[in-house]
Amino acid sequence: MSITTTQVAIVGGGPVGLSLALDLGQRGIKCALIERRGEMHNIPKGQNLTARTMEHFQFWGVEKDVRAARVMPKDFPIGEVLAYRDLTTDWWQASPEREQVLSFYSQTNERMPQYQVETVLRKAIAKLPSVEIIYDWSAASLKQHEGGVELVLEGPQGEARTILADYCVGADGGRSMVREAVGITRSGTDFGAKMALLVFRSKELHERLQRFPKRSTYTVLKPELNGYWQFFGRVDVGEGWFFHAPVPNDADKDFNFAKLLHEAAGFEFACEFDHIGFWDCRIAIAERYQVGRVFIAGDAAHTHPPYGGFGLNNGVEDAANLGWKLAAVLKGWAGAKLLETYSQERQPVFRDIGEDFIAGWIREEGEWLQRYNPDRNLEEFEAAWKNLKMRGGSRGMTYEPHYEGSPAVAGPTGGKPSAHGQHMFKARAGHHLTPQTLADGRSNFDALGSEFTLLAFGAGDAADRFPASAKQLGIPLTILRDGNQAARDAYEADLVLVRPDQYVVWTGDTAPHDVAELLRKVTGR
């Protein structure tokens, strides 16, 4: 049995594992990426890439490559049509969604099948000498001890191989071997519904939906479904589609899926199926994301109905949060307690996403559909439909993940990491930094350092106290001085300290009394 040593072993080469390998590899961390699939799947899941995810791709240098892999036309809108009963109804709306918050990010959102993203990330990682890619192998067992982790792999012919690593990250999906090996339990709402995922081709459906403004998704609300959705999504513009909907618990692949599609659309159309699959409508969130030297991320840590595009995007955010922290500890400029903040920050955020946003939406829409019915009271229904704000912009504005109260954030006392918040341009400790234009015309996101950055706006010599303390502690710090008063006014602070994943960890108009103490706090020391 061959034995390989590395710094970080990553189990699972989907978008989360690939993102983490890319982040670590670009930071010079030696890692091994283990993925049982050598070939790409062709199921168009994980379609929606948020502006925040595209920011990560920007910093990893693959944003342009990801956009170039888009299947749909570049000018085709990403938003949604929401319809009552079926897609022939007069009761429909195409309200703005995440477009309302785009000014708070340096990138715009994007849409494409997950396998397109994975292809781009695989190519980028293949260029990194510090990353060993092990495709067609599976992780069979895992043990950890005080000094590291021992991972036993099984090859395509049953051969064995051992990986010895300082740390291991399980990005190996909802049935995670890594999670089970370290005894992390999950809990959450189980709706008890069986859902179908259909991938099909139909030019006729594309033609019939020309009655609507250009949109990428079409959601049908039906009273009898009690808040669950029938959901059409474009894979391309012309004939490629996917569809999610609840089905009877005894449904199998012989079920009449064409009839289901026709009922949701409100008309019959010709179609050819490429894939038929099922999933359980439940939310499962891990109680914690770390045990010793083992971490979990993505679907290994949180699974949920594919509503709202939260899965892939939050998995990538997991990778961005964990990646710089692992690298900082391995390079010696951060303390081990920094790694504990990964679970402390990310787990509460997705708990809110799963139970308050996703489960809450299903409950709210079920209640709305039971209360308002055009057959019972047409006038009341039409007034409620006109004012319907269950979805779209109002929700997007209150979805603002943050890490207030994190031990690695120097902010007001009493805060707690949460997905609930309010988008602001003001720089707030624990919150995502918003982009601003510098005096030289650049976006500050193009000028941020790869590790910590101190933004200094007309702060006199206050920023001068940071470099010496950072150097003494060995913390990489970029000082970005700028005279743009508009940016300073937007942030409402002269000094803004930003960590590697573009979250603010401290703000002030003057330097703190003990700069070294601040830097030790935000690096887990």
Image (cartoon, rainbow, N blue to C red):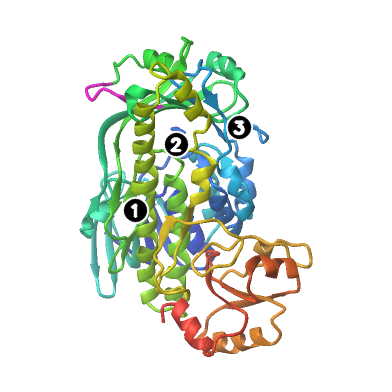
The answer to whether the residue labelled 1 contacts the one labelled 2, judged by CB atoms less than 8 Å apart, is no
Q: Quick check: can you spot residue 204? A: yes
Q: Specify the segment rendered in magenta.
A: 244-252
Res. 351 mark: 1
- Kindly report the distance in space between the C-alpha atoms of the residues bearing marks 3 and 1: 33 Å
- Rendered location of residue 368, percent (x, y): 39, 32
Q: Which residue is mark 3?
A: 72
**Residue type at the position of mark 3:** Met
Residue at the spot x=52%, y=39% of the render? Answer: 392
**Residue type at the position of mark 1:** Arg
Of marks 3 and 1, the one in the foreground: 1
Label 3 environment density (alpha carbons within 10 Å; few <14, some 14–19, many ≥20): some
- Rendered location of residue 350, percent (x, y): 38, 53
> Is residue 350 toward the left or the right of residue 23 in the image?
left
Residue at the spot x=37%, y=52% of the render? Answer: 352
N-terminal label among 3 and 2: 2
Residue at the spot x=44%, y=58% of the render? Answer: 319
Q: Quadrant of the C terminus?
A: bottom left
